[in-house]
Image: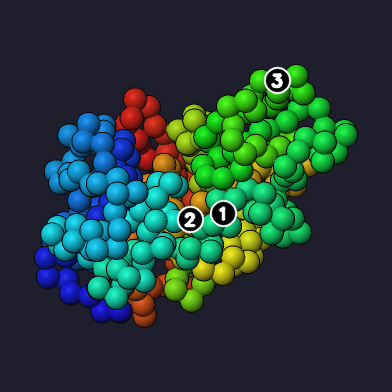
């Protein structure tokens, strides 16, 4: 699609406290459209980011929006492109993306079916059970796990993995933990190093580069310290995993555990930008730039094998992100 770049406005949804990510998106967007306005929106007018950016708008909660009211909001604010950033809103934007596209508004989003698969952890396990990087054994009941398991992970079956998660639980601790979970799933505890793999996938389902980064300090599911490294063999396996899901598009990241035998275990795939994605964007994974180029009809300018930097590090302390 070819969009107009006159008075082009990009909507960064669910701003919350994602200040570093917002500024990274701004930087990349303006390499394509120098005068692009980037508006951060949130339904919470008192969110941390509201007073820390130049352009902030209150957006109605997505459950209060239908197609027409969503289109009216976008047109009122001259929105021509949308970057969703929160797990809980991805399905909403996926459902409405064709309607918005027909009204000349682009969304960096995967298909509804791809997002649904990634959100359902039990279906995700069954789908990737025999993948190049197999998913972690997952069951709907504790009895279905191997009897050799001594420590367990308990999560909500649907939605964000960090929500109500219980890590390294004993059999006795599980009973108390599941009381606060609506639809629990059970996994064996796998100890090891955590890594994230990030890519950008075009409308034809082709990955353009993969960034691997160790998650050296994780707080509430988000990387507060992360370092990019290179491993071509692992990168190739991860590309194979990404391409197994038809409809994955835009910025996509996977979480993987590497055990003490160097075996890889697929934890989840998130079809969105992550909290530490500014590191990958800085390293040359130009997801925002490429998404805008694709939307504007300039796909021929997107490199098939981008040059990506290794060795960069991200640290986050007191909401301040540093990359070096």
Residue 92 at what x, y percent from top left?
39, 56
Lateral position of residue 17 relative to residue 146, left or right: left
Say if mark 1 contacts mark 2, CB within 8 Å. Answer: yes
Query: Outermost residue, right direction?
Result: 147
Alpha carbons under labels 2 and 3: distance apart:
32 Å
Q: CA distance from mark 1 to mark 2?
A: 8 Å
Q: Where residue 173 is drawn, which disc sits there?
A: 3
The residue wearing badge 1 is 118
Mark 1 or mark 2: whose residue is earlier in sequence: 1
Question: In the drawing, does residue 16 fall left or right of residue 212?
Answer: left
Tell me if I can see residue 37 in this picture. Answer: yes
Nearest the viewer among 127 and 267 is: 127
In this rendering, is residue 9 above or below 138?
below
Q: Residue at x 43, y 42 (%)?
A: 276
Mark 2 vs 3, N-terminal side: 3
Image location (x, y in percent) of residue 165: 58, 32
Return the residue nearer the eye: 200 or 154: 154
């Amino acid at each position: 699609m070819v969009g107009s770049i006159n008075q082009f406005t990009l909507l960064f949804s669910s701003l919350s406290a994602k200040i570093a990510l917002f500024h990274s998106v701004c930087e990349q967007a303006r390499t394509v459209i120098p005068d692009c306005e980037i508006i951060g929106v949130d339904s919470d007018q008192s969110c941390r980011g509201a007073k820390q950016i130049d352009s902030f708008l209150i957006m109605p909660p997505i459950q209060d929006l239908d197609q027409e009211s969503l289109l009216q909001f976008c047109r009122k604010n001259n929105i021509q492109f949308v970057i969703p950033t929160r797990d809980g809103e991805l399905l909403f934007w996926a459902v409405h993306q064709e309607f918005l596209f027909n009204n000349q508004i682009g969304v960096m989003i995967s298909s509804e079916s791809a997002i649904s698969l990634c959100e359902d952890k039990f279906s995700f396990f069954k789908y990737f059970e025999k993948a190049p990087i197999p998913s972690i054994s997952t069951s709907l009941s504790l009895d279905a796990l191997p009897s050799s398991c001594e420590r367990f992970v308990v999560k909500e079956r649907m939605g964000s993995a960090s929500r109500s998660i219980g890590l390294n639980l004993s059999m006795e601790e599980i009973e108390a933990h599941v009381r606060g979970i609506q639809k629990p799933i059970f996994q064996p505890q796998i100890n090891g190093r955590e890594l994230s793999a990030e890519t950008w996938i075009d409308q034809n389902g082709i990955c353009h580069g993969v960034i691997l980064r160790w998650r050296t300090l994780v707080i509430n599911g988000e990387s507060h310290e992360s370092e990019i490294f290179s491993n071509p063999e692992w990168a190739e396996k991860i590309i194979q995993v990404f391409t197994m899901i038809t409809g994955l598009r835009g910025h996509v990241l996977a979480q993987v555990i590497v055990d003490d035998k160097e075996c890889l275990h697929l934890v989840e795939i998130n079809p969105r930008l992550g909290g530490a994605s500014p590191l990958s964007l800085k390293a040359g994974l130009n997801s925002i730039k490429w998404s805008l180029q694709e939307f504007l009809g300039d796909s021929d300018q997107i490199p098939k094998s981008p040059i990506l930097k290794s060795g960069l590090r991200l640290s986050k302390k007191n909401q301040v992100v540093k990359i070096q």
